[in-house]
Amino acid sequence: MKHRTIDSPVGTLTLVVDDAGTLCALYTDGQKYFPLPEALGERDDTVAADAVAQLAEYFAGERADFDVELAPRGTAFQQEVWDALRAIPAGETRSYGEVAAALGRPGASRAVGAATGRNPISIIVPCHRLVGASGAMTGYAGGVDRKRWLLDHERGVRQL
């Protein structure tokens, strides 16, 4: 494992790659479930160059979606949820229940919430696009203010 940090409009981001150089984590500063430093591996400011470039385009309003290779680590159910999150268009939201129903598990909205909270690749795997059944901004591992900022940003560049 290796990691690097970059500045962004939503604070410092930490990108972690596996031994093959594939992005396996993207954490926001102060994020819930941020790993211990030794889990990040050594610092190398040359890794994840494609992800860094795409994040810069995203924050500049020049990109709405990402196409970097990902290797998030999680259970089979978590992987299903994270894949479903990537299918939500930029600037749009879905409820936890809608994602559960889309996965064929209509009673699993809490499990979807738990899997979303453990998403290791924030922003690129857009867990910020999930809201409560009423449309309310519910919990977000990176903080509700950051979630609101990301959604507002995406809605401003939605035409991409």
Image (cartoon, grey):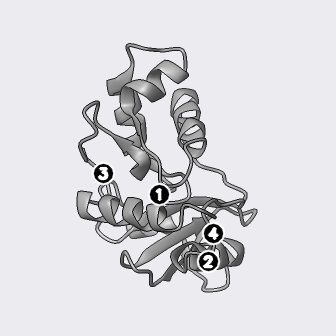
Q: Earlier in the sequence, mark 4 or mark 1?
A: 4
**What percent of the width, then of the height, locates residue 23?**
64, 62
* Residue to which mark 4 is pinned: 63
**What percent of the width, then of the height, locates residue 130?**
39, 42
Say which amino acid is labelled 1: Ser
Say which amino acid is labelled 3: Tyr
Q: Quadrant of residue 79?
A: top right
Q: Is residue 146 left or right of residue 21?
A: left
**CB under 8 Å between discs 1 and 3:** no
* Residue to which mark 3 is pinned: 140
Q: Nearer the viewer, mark 2 or mark 1?
A: 2
Q: Quadrant of residue 107?
A: top left
Say which amino acid is labelled 4: Arg
**10 Å crowding of disc 3: few (<14), some (14-19), many (20+):** many
Quadrant where the image shows the C terminus: bottom right
Which mark, by number, is residue 57?
A: 2
**CB under 8 Å between discs 3 and 2:** no
Mark 2 to mark 1 CA distance (whole Å): 16 Å
